[in-house]
Structures are given as C-alpha cells and as structure tokens.
Image (cartoon, rainbow, N blue to C red):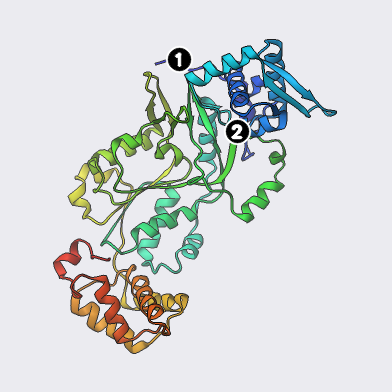
Amino acid sequence: MLALEPPSPYTQLLDAEPDATLPPQPKSVRDTGLPQQLVVELVAKALCLGGKSHLPVLTTKLHLSINVLREVLDFMVAEHVVEVAWRGESDIDVQYQLTGAGKQRASAWLERCPYAGPAPVTLEAYRAMVERQAVHVPQPCADELAAEFTDDFLAPPVQRMLGAAMYAGRSMLLYGPSGSGKSVLARRLGALLQGLVAVPHALVVGQDIVQVYDPALHRAPLPRQARLAQQAPERRSSDPRWVLCQRPVVALDASLDADMLDLQPDATSGCYRAPPQLKANNGLLIVDDLGRQRLPAADLLNRFAHAQELERSAMSLAGGYHFHVPCRMRLVYVTSLPPSSLLDDAALRRVGYKIPVAALSAANYRTLLRQQCLSMGVAYDEAALRYLLDELHAGSGLPLLACYPREIVGRVADFAGFMGEPARLSIAALDQAWISMFAGGQPHAADVDVEPRIA
C-alpha cells in the first residue's frame, strides 16, 4: 500500500470554517491540495478536446477558480505548453491554446488517462468533509416523523421504532408481506434526513480518479433550501469542485452482486465510478429485496455491518492501491422473507432494529382507498367498498396490504377511460379490476403467503 500524502493546506481551510456547508474556494494551486502536474494535465486535456478556449470557459469545465487556473496557465506558457491566442481588455478576457509541443503532451496524457472532467479533491479532504458532515446530522423528532408518515397508517409502535432507529443512526430491517409498503416506507425515511451536504465531483486516489457525484442520486437542494444556501456568506466564495446536495438516498435491489460494491473502472471516461455505499455517505442506503441478491444475505449484511462499526469501507484500485473511505450512512434492509430464514441469530444481532410492517387494519384500508378514489377522480361508493372487503378480500384470504388500493382504483379508472365512461367504484368494476390483478381471479392462500401475484 502506498503511503498517504502529508496533510495539505486544503484541510486547514476546512477546519478554518467548520460551520460552512461548502468548503472555501482555494486561491492557489497549493490551496487545492492537488499536485500542480495533475492540474496541468487537466488543463491541457481540456484544451486538446475543446480547442482554443476563454479562461472563464476553462473554469466552468474544470471547476477551478480563475486564480488557480491563471497560476497554472502562466506556468504552462512559461513551459511552452500553452500560448495566449487572444487577449481582450479585461484580465479574464483571454483565450488560450496548446502549442505544437503542448498538443503532443496532451495527446500522451489523454492516452494514459482520458479523464478530462472537473478537477478532483484529495482523499484526505473528502474524509475530513464526510466526518464533519456526519457530526452535524440534525436528529429527527417525534413530531417530524408523525408529520412525514401521517398518510402511511403506521401503527404507533412501528412509528416509535422507526424514529428511535433514525435518531440513533442504527441499521433497520423492515420485514413483512410483499405489498405491505416496506420499500416505499424505506424511501420515505430519506425525507427525515434534514440539511444539505457537499459532494465532490471526483476524488484523486494515487494516480487515479474516482467519480463520486451522481446527478441521479445527489439531488439539488429544494427551493427553500436553495434560498437559505444562497443567503449564506460562504456561497460567494465556495470551492466549485463540490456540489451542494440533499442528503442522498441510494436504493439497491435484487440485481446487486458483489462486484457492484467495488470501484468500477470506466474505460470511456478514464476514471473509476464510486460504488453505492460511497455515494450514500451522509445519507441513506437501502438494500431492497434482501435475500434475492446474487450473494448470500448474511455476507451482505456482515460486510455493511463491519464497515459501519469501523466507520470506513475498504477500497482497492486495479494497480493494487488499497485505501479506505468513510462509511457514514444510515442503513435500511427490506425483505418479504422471514428474517429467521435469511439470517442466523448472530447476523440478526448485528441489525439494530427489526421492524415488522404488516397489513393494514380495515379502517385504515378504507381510508386509503377513499384517498385513492379522490386523487384519481373515481366516484366512491360505500357498498362497493364493503363488497371489496367482505367478498373479494375475505373470500380469497388476501390480507389488506397497502399496495392494493392504488392498484384497484387505478384499474377501475383504466377500464372506465377505455370505455369512455365516468370512473366509479362499483361491484362490477371491482370484479374486473380484481380478475385483471390476479391470475384466475381467486388466488390461492398458499400463493399469498409467499408473494401476491400482482400483474
């Protein structure tokens, strides 16, 4: 394993402003914590791919300040790698282009590593930022949880278990029948993670680049959050290598295999793509359909539990460089299988809270179905609802799962729309919806116990 670099001035900048969400803007190459040669190569590759460029264009492409780029470009001009193609009246109205020798060097650098995206931050700076943000996680209170789940009809004991687990930052296992709303509930927990976090576009690890920011997962601040962030003084001089985001919610499904938890080399971009647990730092990681992945449930749980206990995850690059990244996330497992069939007692003990998510009560089921009728414009009928409960559900032995009202009312609306008729809840409409949902119209109880067959 290669030795880590000594502490850089950049981490001192982080320590200097502990209350700032985004790190301060570096004013020199030294302040970035990056080797000058790395920045030189990024500038050369940007000019090679984009041609003659204005200084402000390069700042946008590389996410480096004008002061840092001007320092690097002055050095590159002195080394005859870059030349000034045009100069306007202002200090920043300058165009640069590669010299003949610079084009040869840039081509060689691109061949060795085609990455030409935003400048990375150091691994040391990333560790410091994640740890600082982990300390300042706002803890949810009982009122906030109740407000978030007011329409989910959770039993009070379940709400209290969810709240206690989120408050303590301990892992959770949500278990119950398929269709009881566990997956939706897990994702809703992400709304309880308040505050914003800074996520770097990329990290530099040894000689390699690891891409961390993922626009599909790292969502922009909500309008209210954005307004507050714009009022903060640090926004005027923040480091553009970082992106201000909501706390991430990353969900893994049954397609997960062991390789997906490691760094993924991307030959096209010339960098590594961060695994999901790294992208989920300072947020929520959901493992859905636990027990259906391509690796044993116990192995997956133990891997994450070990990383959470150590507060770090082990990573390795293709060249044999081994290193650690922080592991500071909330972890939620979701399964429709009996926990005892997936995990032994030792593995279950490593899960902080085991939380059952059961079928709805008749009263809550009625309320949810009325809400779905209202939201989809379907006329509600009490007699039809009694038929649904007393004949269809009771006759088939199907539990009153949270997934059914939306499915049933949606199909009633589908049939009515196709026929050009007003959508209304009726016995005939419910029979049509029910038959279209279940093969044969009346599912067997044995099938329900495993997983209701919703089309």
Q: Is residue 54 left or right of residue 286?
A: right
Single out the residue that lies furthest toward the top: 79
The vertical placement of 292 against 56, above or below, is below
Mark 2, residue position: 241
Place of residue 342 in the rendered image (x, y in percent of width and height, measured from the top left): 20, 48
Q: Secondary structure at mark 2?
A: loop
Q: Position of residue 448 (x, y in %)?
A: 19, 66
Q: Residue at x 46, y 28 (%)?
A: 271
Label number found at residue 3: 1
Q: Give the quarter of the image for residue 33.
A: top right
Q: Where is residue 32 drawn, in percent x and y?
A: 62, 24
Q: Secondary structure at mark 1?
A: loop
Q: Nearer the viewer, residue 38 or 200?
A: 38
Whole-percent x, y for residue 184 in the image: 39, 59
Q: Amino acid at mark 1?
A: Ala
Residue furthest right in the image: 89
Callout 1 crowding tier (Cα within 10 Å): few <14, some 14–19, many ≥20: few
Q: Nearer the viewer, residue 199 or 294?
A: 294
